[in-house]
Amino acid sequence: MIFGLPGYAHAFDLTGAWATSAEQCRKVFAHKGRANQLTFTNFSGVYGGGFIAEPDRLRSKFENCKIKSRKDDGQTINIIVGCASGIMVSNVQFFLKAVDDDTITRQFPGIEGMEVNYHRCKI
């Protein structure tokens, strides 16, 4: 990381597990297998669901999305991902606003009042 350069804005660290409720993290995510890989519980959707962010992809319980582009503008993060679910591939755009280090809000431009908060899970 570079310090002291004017105009330098560091990218928000999105890596980790994100759930719609911090209290439900252990009901949404679990570590499984020999590699202790982070994955979703069987009934994660019942508890609000969430996603797992890795440096080059976003994963939900049913989709695996490769990050195609990312632009950070202060507290706003714009991500375009290519998602594969079964036989279908689609591009999805995410507009995220960093509230603090452990809270983000997904915004849906063009849909007044539509947003979803996510909390970083420390599991």
Image (cartoon, rainbow, N blue to C red):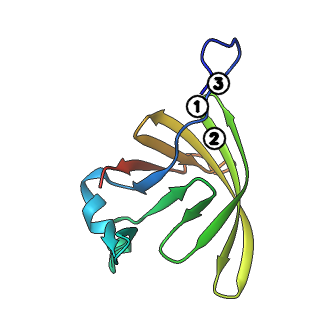
Confirm or deny contact between disc 1 and disc 3 (CB under 8 A).
no
Dot 3: element? loop
Residue 75: which disc?
Answer: 1
Residue 9: which disc?
Answer: 3
**In front: 19, or 33?**
33
Q: Nearer the viewer, mark 2 or mark 3?
A: 3
Q: Residue furthest front?
A: 34
Q: Residue at x 50, y 44 (%)?
A: 105
Identify whether 97 is placed above or below 106: above
Q: Disc 2 to disc 3, how far (Cα)?
A: 12 Å
Name the residue tied to disc 2: 77
Residue 9 image-quadrant placement: top right
Residue 71 image-quadrant placement: top right
**In front: 110, or 51?**
51
Q: Residue at x 34, y 76 (%)?
A: 34
Q: Amino acid at mark 2?
A: Ile
| Quadrant showing the N terminus | top right
Identify whether 19 is placed above or below 76: below
Going by the image, does 88 lie left or right of 61?
Answer: right
Residue 107: which disc?
Answer: none
Q: Amino acid at mark 3?
A: Ala
Q: Amino acid at mark 1?
A: Gln
Q: Residue 87 at x, y = what percent?
A: 70, 88
Q: Disc 1 to disc 2, how far (Cα)?
A: 7 Å
Categorize mark 3 by other alpha carbons within 10 Å: few (<14), some (14-19), many (20+).
few
